[in-house]
Image (cartoon, grey):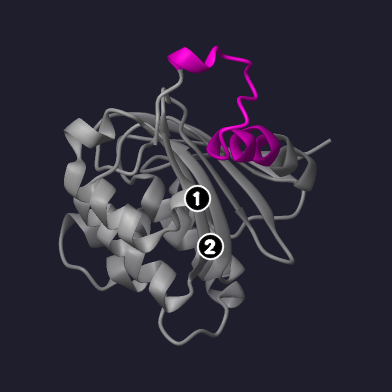
């Protein structure tokens, strides 16, 4: 049975302070950090990264944490924070929307090795809503690692030799000033469950047995 924690951005600050101390002790030694894109920024984006790091802290093996915030950060802040405390990570994700700024930072994180590899399923309407963001991802990723489909899921699967993290919830890779709720789990079994279906969908293996005439092309 997983350990269960809850975190409320801007509310439970006593928990946030305790977790911040743990985060500092666990920070790996790297030549630069993905998180520096945010913590070195002035204004709202830097505040968002700091609030995310303080609230989530350092994951524990076998732990599940439920998190809610008033739009204090997006999924990209969580991913950047996790690479900071857990080291460089492989990423597989599904999301409904992405921003141009987020994809620029993700491409740079892949170039620098903070994100070791990336596979993604995006909703097909990103071609209409965010064509520039899609172009950035297509340039940064192999064509076999990026698929467009009918997707409203927001799930981010991260792993390296020591960690298997599943982040599921409402946040997209966008800035959204609304209440966001999510669950962060460190469990190889949970991670494997989602990797199996999401990897199959990205590969075009049709894990949901949807008639191919309804499936969207890349």
Q: x, y (%) of residue 43?
A: 15, 60
The mark that comes first in sequence, 1 or 2, is 2
Label 1 crowd bin: few (<14), some (14–19), many (20+), radius 10 Å: some
User: Is residue 14 among what the camera can see?
Assistant: no
Specify the quadrant that holds the N terminus. top right
Residue drawn at x 57%, y 64% as measured from the top left: 89
Does residue 28 appear in the picture of this structure?
Answer: yes
Q: For numbered disc 1, what is the local secondary structure?
A: helix
* Residue designated by label 1: 145
Position of 181 with respect to 125 (left or right) is: right
Quarter assignment of residue 193: top right
Asked if 187 appears above or below 82 in the picture, the reply is: above
Give the position of the C terminus as an image quadrant: top left
Dots 1, 2 in contact, CB < 8 A: yes
Residue 98 numbered mark, or none: none
Query: Could you say where residue 215 lies in the image, as x and y percent from the top left?
Result: 46, 20
Residue 207 in the magenta stretch? The answer is: yes
Query: Of discs 1 and 2, which sits in the foreground?
Result: 1
How far apart marks 1 and 2 lie (CA) works out to 9 Å
- Label 2 Cα neighbours within 10 Å, binned few <14 / some 14-19 / many ≥20: some
Which residues fall within the magenta stretch? 194-214
Q: Residue at x 53, y 62 (%)?
A: 117
Whole-percent x and y of residue 35?
38, 68
Question: Which residue is rendered at x = 24% and y = 35% of the image?
Answer: 127
Which residue is denoted by mark 2 in the rendering? 117
Residue 57: image x %, image y %? 54, 57
Any magenta on residue 185?
no
18 in relation to 155, above or below: below
């Amino acid at each position: 049975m997983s350990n269960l924690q809850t975190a409320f951005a801007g509310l439970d600050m006593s928990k946030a302070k305790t977790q911040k101390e743990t985060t500092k002790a666990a920070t790996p030694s790297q030549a630069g950090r993905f998180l520096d894109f945010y913590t070195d920024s002035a204004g709202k984006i830097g505040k968002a990264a700091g609030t995310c790091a303080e609230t989530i802290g350092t994951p524990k093996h076998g732990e599940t944490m439920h998190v809610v915030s008033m739009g204090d950060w997006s999924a990209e802040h969580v991913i950047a924070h996790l690479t900071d405390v857990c080291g460089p990570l492989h990423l597989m994700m599904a999301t409904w929307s992405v921003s141009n700024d987020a994809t620029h930072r993700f491409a740079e994180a892949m170039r620098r090795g903070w994100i070791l590899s990336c596979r993604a399923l995006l909703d097909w309407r990103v071609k209409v809503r965010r064509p520039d963001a899609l172009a950035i991802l297509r340039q940064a990723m192999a064509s076999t690692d990026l698929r467009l489909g009918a997707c409203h899921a927001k799930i981010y699967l991260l792993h390296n030799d020591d960690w298997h993290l599943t982040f599921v919830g409402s946040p997209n890779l966008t800035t959204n000033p609304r209440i966001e709720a999510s669950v962060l789990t460190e469990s190889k079994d949970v991670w494997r469950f989602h990797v199996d279906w999401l990897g199959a969908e990205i590969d075009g293996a049709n894990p949901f047995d949807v008639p191919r005439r309804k499936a969207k092309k890349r």
